[in-house]
Amino acid sequence: MEQALPQRTIEVLHSIVQCYVETGEPVASRTIARRRKDQLSPATIRNIMADLADLGYLSQPHTSAGRVPTPKAFHHFAQALSSRAVPDSGVDRLRDELVQCVSLDQRAEHASHVLTALTRNVGIVAAIPASAQALDQIELVRLSEGRVLMVVVTRDGLVHNQVAFLHEPVSQDDLASIRNYVNANFTGWSLTAIRGELDQLLHEERALYDGLLRRLNLLYSQGLLSFGFAPRIFLEGASNLVGLDLHLTKEKLRELFRTLEEKQRLIALLDQFLDAGSGEVQVQVGLEHAHPAMRELSLIGINVPLPGGGETRMAVLGPMRMNYPRVMSAVVQLGRVLQSLPQ
């Protein structure tokens, strides 16, 4: 169980986080002492900082430098903010804008623009319909020129056909093995649950070496089993990441942008870090589990259950040094507006 911090220690920790967000530089004890009103000496603050470092909240990049908050510190700071009341300033204006969008997709697309404009980070919004079909069976048929016909039949009788274009040869026997694997293991599952299970399975290291799983991943990335649930996802502001010092090589930065272009990856990101149906703002600091290039990024998001039974998942993706109060306020206010709109 995580050790509870004394109130004064929490105040010092949060002051360090705020200072680092503002400057991007290691924070010295004298800087924190000048910010406080209780006349704590730099020596006392140094002792508190040393304790926080021992607990994993601070790191020291150089011997003579100040301290830098760790992901654990950012998470503590963000969680404390999430328990505070968020003012309703600007809600009426947002409602006036969004009420003009008549469909769930239009509202989600506009919401991604709003999040980006308000936070100057990356706004991600997924519009999720109310229904989620259960799988009956799939069929895979090899066509010419690297194409594969994917046929999915659901328990309610819906048949969905889609053609995938693969960049490597896959035989009909390979496709039969994939079909048998999916039908044997996932018949009767909701498409939502299958997607979550496959996303976890396909990110395991053994999926790199297992031929069947690797070929299944090719089809999955092309949209196999993603219909029906049919979330539409909108992203705005990826260019805001370009100016950040994320300590990434050019190749890693390209990988990050390729990841943000893949709709399935974005849906999986929201599935992984936002608890369905919670309705509370959630914070994930450090996203290396989703992709190594996201190690220094944070996600602040919320699931908004809608009166008509659908759901909107929205989040802001940005650096650990993002303005947490502003981002969390934008996410919460926009969530309130979306939930209040007529369906």
Image: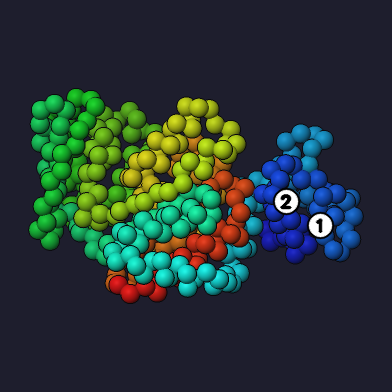
Residue 2 position in % (x across, y down)? 63, 57
Q: Which mark is residue 35?
A: 1
Position of 147 compared to 239: left or right? left
Estimate how packed mark 2 is, as few (under 14), some (14 to 19) or many (20 or more) residues with alpha carbons within 10 Å: many
Position of 18 compared to 129: left or right? right
Task: Please report whichever mark, 1 or 2, sits nearer to the chain's N-terminal start.
Answer: 2
Position of 136 compared to 102: left or right? left
Amino acid type shown at disc 2: Cys
Picture quadrant of residue 260: top left
Q: Secondary structure at mark 1?
A: helix
Q: Nearer the viewer, residue 75 or 119?
A: 119
Distance (Cα) linking label 1 and label 2: 9 Å
Residue 5 position in % (x across, y down)? 72, 60
Residue 251 position in % (x across, y down)? 47, 27
User: Is residue 145 in view?
Assistant: yes
Quadrant location of the C terminus? bottom left
Q: Residue at x 29, y 49 (%)?
A: 195
Q: Secondary structure at mark 2?
A: helix
Cβ atoms at labels 1 and 2 below 8 Å apart: yes
Residue 288 position in % (x across, y down)? 50, 41
Q: Which residue is mark 2?
A: 19
Q: Residue at x 40, y 38 (%)?
A: 259
Quadrant location of the N terminus? bottom right
In the depicted structure, whether residue 219 falls above or below residue 155? above
Q: Which mark is residue 6?
A: none
User: Is residue 56 in view?
Assistant: no
In the depicted structure, whether residue 227 falls above or below residue 128? above
Q: Residue at x 69, y 61 (%)?
A: 4
Q: How many dots with numbers?
A: 2
Amino acid type shown at disc 1: Arg
